Structures are given as C-alpha cells and as structure tokens.
Image (tube, grey):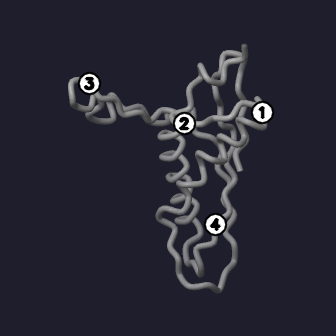
Amino acid sequence: MAEVSVDANGKLRVHKIIAAVNCGPFVHPDTIQSQVEGAVALALSAAMKGEITIAYGATVQSNFDDYPILTFDEMPEVEVHIVPSNEALGGIGEPGLPPVAPAVCNAIFAATGKRVRRLPIRATELKRT
C-alpha cells in the first residue's frame, strides 16, 4: 500500500509504504525490515527517477553521479508487517521490490484520477490542467 500526494504542478511525494511479507519461518525480524526498506528505496528510485537514455548508440548514464536515486529526505516511512508462517523458507531478498511501483501508481490514480502507464513517473503527466 502506498500513501501519496500530488501537488498542482504534478510533484509526487510518497509519504508511506506499508508492506506485508510472508517469507516463511524467520529468525531476525530486523533484517527483514531492513531488507524491505532497501527494496522500497530501490523500487521508488526506479519508478520515480530511473531512466536510461541512449545517445549516439551508447548509454548517457554511467554511474550514480548521473543516474539519480532517491535521497534521504525523499524516502517515505516504511511499515513492514511480517506474516507468521509455517510454510517453507522463502527468503526476503527480492519480494519487497516488485509491488512498490504498482502500489504507487494506484495511489496516484486514487489521488488524481490519472493513470500512470509508463515509468519513470513524470510530473508533466500528473500536472493538473
């Protein structure tokens, strides 16, 4: 679940992400929390800023100095709920990443009535006209 706001200029702010994870039996819940927080940061970076452009047959972006990622002040609150489970061990490496962009895009639709159909999310597409 994502809680967002969009101002009149289309500036998106993600305030909160709530994640429920079922990774089977677990030992260290703090590690699970950290893993999901990192996945959210990576997913939001890709959804809101991640763009690879090509010029003259080569990528323009070469490293993190010209490929923007989420900054600390842009990071939303992340609430993680670990589902108690006796299922087989599943791990927690990647499951926190894929649902973030769809959750944010659905929250944008709920807030603005505008559907996001491609990433990264552009303020120009969210701007009120």
Left or right position of 69 against 61: right
In the picture shown, does residue 123 fall above or below 75? above
Instruction: Give the secondary structure at mark 1.
Output: helix
- Tag 2 or tag 3, which sits nearer the N-term? 3
Per the image, the residue denoted by label 2 is 118
Query: What is the distance, in whole Å, between disc 3 and disc 4 at their CAs?
Result: 40 Å
Query: What is the distance, in whole Å, between disc 3 and disc 2 at their CAs?
Result: 21 Å
Count of numbered labels shown in the rendering: 4
Task: Tell me the amino acid under the disc marked 3.
Answer: Ala
In the picture shown, does residue 80 fall above or below 76? below
Task: Tell me the amino acid under the disc marked 2.
Answer: Arg
- Tag 3 or tag 1, which sits nearer the N-term? 3
**Dividing the image into 4 quarters, which one contains the C terminus?**
top right
Task: Identify the residue at image location x=67%, y=18%.
Answer: 127
The residue most toward the top is 129
Task: Tell me the amino acid under the disc marked 4.
Answer: Val
Task: Identify the residue at image location x=78%, y=37%.
Answer: 110
User: How would you rate the neighbour count of disc 4 (Cα within 10 Å): few for under 14, some for 14-19, many for 20 or more?
Assistant: some
Task: Identify the residue at image location x=78%, y=33%.
Answer: 111
- Tag 2 or tag 4, which sits nearer the N-term? 4
Which one is in front, 19 or 8?
A: 8
Which one is in front, 46 or 117?
A: 117
Per the image, the residue denoted by label 4 is 21
Per the image, the residue denoted by label 1 is 111
Task: Tell me the amino acid under the disc marked 1.
Answer: Ala
User: How would you rate the neighbour count of disc 1 (Cα within 10 Å): few for under 14, some for 14-19, many for 20 or more?
Assistant: few
Per the image, the residue denoted by label 3 is 55
- Tag 4 or tag 3, which sits nearer the N-term? 4
Instruction: Give the secondary structure at mark 3.
Output: strand
Front tag of 1 and 2: 2
